[in-house]
Image: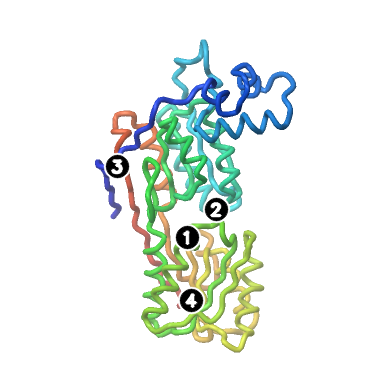
């Protein structure tokens, strides 16, 4: 069962949008120069270009590409920015978004941030110049510049996949912290006390970090220890899950159970164990996250947390499309997860 919370006390109010004149004053150039920069016409020195762009971002100015005769055009576009298209998780979310927007005669325009907040800000800045009806962004963490732009424009913004923190307009997702704690409680209940953890995208996958921090806190508070961690700066594959599992199981303080940041890594860990004659879960227990469909094809069902990815996309897109709801009420729509207890724990 999911929950929806409206915060009527917090208002997503914004002041009068800044103009080219305001940008010119901050940058110390003429309004004509600002116009040329925004239109990308004529020669502009690198110094002036940088000053104008920095000034625009500092005050939250976004150029309107639909100005003039198109100013009153009912734009059907919705900007959608996700961290990656290489993860099955986001393809399912995008399916929910795309199908729902289509039913509402809206069209998604996609951008991929590759887990970079600066890149996300740049994509959003470009998208807003086309005056979309709304934005859908992954997660609750963004640059100050992006937050400033969204506040100034007042664009309706749905943040997906996470609800553990304040939202710009509305958040649609699961409690990552609760998911990590629930998995820790399950593994402790099975008698495991020494744990390992394997993940990628250190410092950029904020949702995985929230899960692990909650998992770790619960483990330590209830008599367990974290003996081995392997957290890479890059995105990891199933093959990485296999090799890193081999690495930490070869240590003197080998864990009794390994928690992985996603199912792909957990599947790689299972492949290592099966290929090397290790009994799962007798020699080592394994647990993943996401509840992806491919797990059903594995020799053993991996214990995991199943997330309602498609439904999250549907609800976020519905909220963007629903012009009747109050734009000034901050909304939090929390979805439940399902702990799938498989044969690996």
Count of marks placed on residues? 4
Mark linked to residue 88: 2
Identify the residue position indicated by label 4 in the image: 344
The one nearer the camera, 267 or 66, is 66
Tell me, yes or no, whether the two marked residues, 1 and 2, touch with CB atoms within 8 Å. Answer: yes
Q: Quadrant of the C terminus?
A: bottom left
Q: Gap between marks 3 and 4, in whole Å? A: 45 Å
Mark nearest the camera among 4 and 1 is 1
Tell me, yes or no, whether the two marked residues, 3 and 4, touch with CB atoms within 8 Å. Answer: no
Secondary-structure class at tag 2: helix
Q: Gap between marks 2 and 4, in whole Å? A: 22 Å
Secondary-structure class at tag 3: strand
Which residue shows up at 59% across the image and 60% down it? Answer: 201
Mark nearest the camera among 3 and 4 is 3
Secondary-structure class at tag 1: loop
With respect to residue 277, does 62 lie above or below?
above
Sooner in the amino-acid sequence: mark 2 or mark 4: 2
Q: Gap between marks 3 and 2, in whole Å? A: 35 Å
Secondary-structure class at tag 4: loop
Q: Position of residue 283 (x, y in %)?
A: 53, 86
Tell me, yes or no, whether the two marked residues, 2 and 4, touch with CB atoms within 8 Å. Answer: no
Give the left or right position of residue 341, taking residue 293 as reference: left
With respect to residue 193, does 140 lie above or below?
above
Identify the residue position indicated by label 1 in the image: 290
Q: Gap between marks 1 and 3, in whole Å? A: 32 Å
Few, some or many residues within 10 Å of mark 1 (<14, 14–19, 20+) = many
- Quarter occupied by residue 30: top right
Identify the residue position indicated by label 3 in the image: 10
Sooner in the amino-acid sequence: mark 3 or mark 4: 3
Few, some or many residues within 10 Å of mark 2 (<14, 14–19, 20+) = some
Sooner in the amino-acid sequence: mark 3 or mark 2: 3
The one nearer the camera, 147 or 174, is 147
């Amino acid at each position: 069962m999911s929950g929806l919370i409206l915060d009527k006390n917090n208002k997503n109010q914004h002041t009068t949008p800044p103009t080219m004149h305001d940008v010119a004053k901050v940058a110390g150039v003429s309004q004509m120069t600002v116009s040329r920069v925004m239109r990308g016409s004529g020669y502009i020195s690198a110094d002036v270009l940088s000053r104008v762009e920095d000034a625009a971002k500092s005050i939250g100015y976004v150029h309107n590409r639909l100005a003039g005769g198109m100013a009153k055009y009912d734009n059907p576009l919705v900007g959608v920015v996700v961290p990656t298209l290489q993860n099955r998780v986001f393809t399912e979310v995008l399916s929910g978004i795309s199908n729902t927007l289509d039913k509402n005669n809206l069209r998604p325009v996609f951008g991929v941030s590759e887990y970079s907040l600066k890149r996300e800000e740049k994509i959003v800045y470009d998208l807003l110049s086309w005056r979309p009806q709304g934005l859908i962004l992954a997660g609750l963490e963004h640059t100050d510049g992006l937050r400033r732009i969204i506040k100034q424009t007042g664009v309706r913004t749905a943040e997906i996949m996470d609800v553990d923190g304040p939202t710009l307009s509305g958040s649609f997702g699961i409690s990552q912290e609760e998911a990590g704690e629930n998995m820790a409680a399950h593994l402790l209940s099975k008698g495991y006390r020494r744990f390992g953890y394997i993940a990628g995208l250190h410092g950029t996958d904020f949702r995985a970090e929230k899960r692990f921090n909650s998992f770790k806190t619960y483990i330590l508070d209830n008599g367990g220890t974290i003996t081995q961690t392997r957290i890479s700066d890059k995105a990891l594959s199933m093959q990485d899950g296999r090799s890193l599992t081999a690495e930490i199981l070869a240590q003197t303080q080998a864990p009794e159970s390994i928690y992985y940041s996603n199912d792909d890594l957990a599947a790689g860990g299972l492949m290592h164990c099966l290929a090397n004659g290790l009994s799962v879960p007798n020699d080592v227990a394994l647990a993943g996250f996401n509840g992806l469909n491919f797990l059903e094809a594995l020799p053993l069902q991996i214990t995991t947390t199943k997330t309602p990815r498609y439904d999250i996309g549907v609800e976020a897109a519905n909220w963007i499309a629903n012009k009747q709801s109050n734009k000034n009420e901050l909304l939090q729509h929390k979805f439940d997860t399902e702990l799938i207890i498989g044969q690996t724990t």
